[in-house]
Image: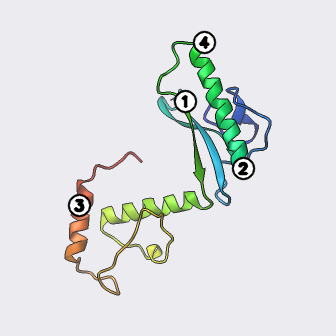
Amino acid sequence: MMPAVHNGDEIHRRGYPDGVPRVDPDDDTLERFVVRHYRYDASRHERRHVVVAAFDNRDEFEACLRECSAALAERRESDPDVDPHEHISGTIQSAGHRQLAANGRMLVRAAEHGVVPAQLRGMELPRNAATYSSQGTPSAVPTLLGRRIRRWLATIPRQRR
């Protein structure tokens, strides 16, 4: 089984389509179209999305998506033991996507601890996150709204990190 390596020439050990130039899926400086294969990863003993390839062009992305889907369908026809949860998907990651996600995780961790780190002010946040302030400057005494938000956050089950 192919290791979960997606850099350089090691991206195609499992027989994924080759032939068009690819970009580094971890390069956060450009918009990338990422093809992923949801499958069992033996090295981590879990099902997860494994990066197949990343492109800077939508047409190449869609072509790879079709080819990978066809290869999986062909494997399903020839092997009845293929995991039914296995599938091919794709995502578009805009430039700066990973940094915004990291900023959002830091915001959640800060809120869980009831603190406001200095670097949070002025930090760009993901579209699904926001900060609020009940006063112009942070206060040592938590506001009623702040206490309610912290209490609400405490009720939400923590996800694996």
Relative vertical location of residue 92 with respect to residue 143 in this rendering, above or below: above
Can residue 77 be seen from the camera position used here? Answer: yes
Lower position in the chain sequence, tag 3 or tag 2: 2
The numbered disc on residue 78 is 4
User: Which of the labelled discs sits on residue 152, or is there none?
Assistant: 3
Q: Classify 142 as above or below 62.
A: below
| Mark 1 or mark 4, whichever is nearer to me | 4
Mark drawn on residue 43: 1
Query: Which of disc 4 and disc 2 is earlier in sequence?
Result: 2
Viewed as shown, does residue 19 lie left or right of 136? right
- Depth check, mark 3 against mark 1: the one in front is 3
> Which residue is labeled 2 in the image?
57
Query: Which mark sits nearer the N-terminus, 3 or 4?
Result: 4
> Mark 3 or 4, which is nearer the eye?
4
Q: CA distance from mark 3 to mark 2?
A: 42 Å
Is 7 or 36 nearer to us in this picture? 36
Residue at 31%, 61% in the rendered image: 112
Q: What's under tag 4, amino acid-wise?
A: Ser
Amino acid found under the numbered disc labelled 3: Trp
Q: Are circles 2 and 1 on residues that touch, CB within 8 Å?
A: no
Separation (CA) of disc 2 from disc 4: 32 Å
The quadrant of the image that shows the N terminus is top right
Mark 2 vs mark 1, foreground winner is: 2
The kind of residue tagged 1 is Ser
